[in-house]
Image (spheres, rainbow, N blue to C red):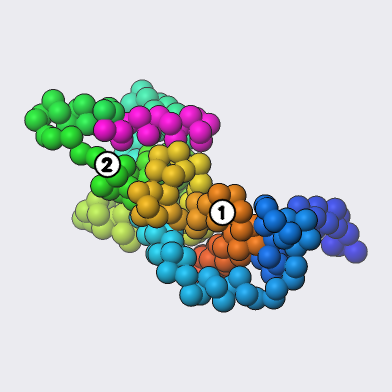
Amino acid sequence: MRSVPLLPAVVLLALFMLGPAIWSLYGSLTNASLTGKAALNPRFIGVKNYTDLMADPEFWKSIGLTVLFTLASAVVGQNVLGLAIALLQKAAHSVVRALVGTIVVGAWVLPEIVAAFALYAFFADDGTLNSVLGMINIPVVHWLYEHPMLSVILANVWRGTAFSMMVYGAALTEVPPEIEEAAKVDGASGWQRLAHITLPMITRSIATNLMLTTLQTLSVFTLIYVMTAGGPGTDSSTLPVLAYQVAFQFAKVGYGTAIATFMLLIGAVFSIIYIRMLKPEVDA
């Protein structure tokens, strides 16, 4: 009887989350297409899409780019920078704290399409970055052509750091100041207090933030598509971009859905890892 109040929430979750996932899995087992006979009457073909994926070098390249993009921009970039800003804000004057917070959060609250075009303009050949570098006599760098992954990684770090900053800012307020003061009196340096007091006390927030930023970054599409469209060639084509290209540009909806379904599995793997990180805290 205690679970009865949760029933509506469970039904809604099953309808709007589990339902689409199951439908996506079914679609990945068909030869659905945007054109031809398969557009009208898609045929069930079993795991053929998945066996074709396993033999597709572009798919494995896309997995590597997706992992690189996620680890560099979310797991490392957003989390490390967000924690660093939160620590600096904790020690800063209230005016500086408000100013920095406004600037960082401003990038996060922008609509994604607006942020994507702003970042494209920043990294373009005649954009802001090359203009600034030109002032110190550094030649023009074709960022979006020569360094597409670096460009979209830096763009995603700029775009998403605010969330990590706010999570860690809230977590740091829960660290008892008297413990840090006691360690300071005992001669512990700032790095020692961070490593042995602050970080262990916010482990739960770190694991939660890692899970949320990882899952969000795995699904980033607009930012990459506007800046590079997955190019040049497929050098910045992560799984969401590849799924879009296959499904809507090459009209292979079933094959594209198989890529999207595989992306769900990658997200599930990351989620399991982070949940296991949280489990000792929950059991305690």
Disc 1 to disc 2: CB gap under 8 Å: no
Which element carries disc 2, helix, strand or loop? Answer: helix
**Magenta residue span:** 110-125
Give amino acid for label 1: Phe
Instruction: Name the chief secondary structure element in magenta.
Output: helix
Q: Residue furthest right?
A: 1
**Going 18% across and 35% down the picture, which residue do you hit?**
140
Badge 2: how crowded within 10 Å, few (<14), some, or many (20+)? some
Which circle, 1 or 2, is nearer the viewer?
A: 1
- Which residue has dot 2 on it? 143
Image position, residue 183 (x, y; %): 29, 55
Q: Nearer the viewer, residue 277 or 160?
A: 160
Asked whether residue 192 is drawn in magenta, I would say: no
Q: Quadrant where the N terminus lies?
A: bottom right
- On residue 250, which mark appears? 1
Q: Is residue 34 visible?
A: yes
Q: Quadrant of the C terminus?
A: bottom right
Q: Amino acid at mark 2?
A: Trp
Please say if 152 is above or below 252. Answer: above
- Residue at x 20%, y 39% (from the top left corner): 141
Q: Nearer the viewer, residue 206 or 200?
A: 206
Label 1 – label 2 distance at C-alpha: 27 Å
When the figure is inspected, residue 236 is found, relative to residue 160, above or below; the finding is below
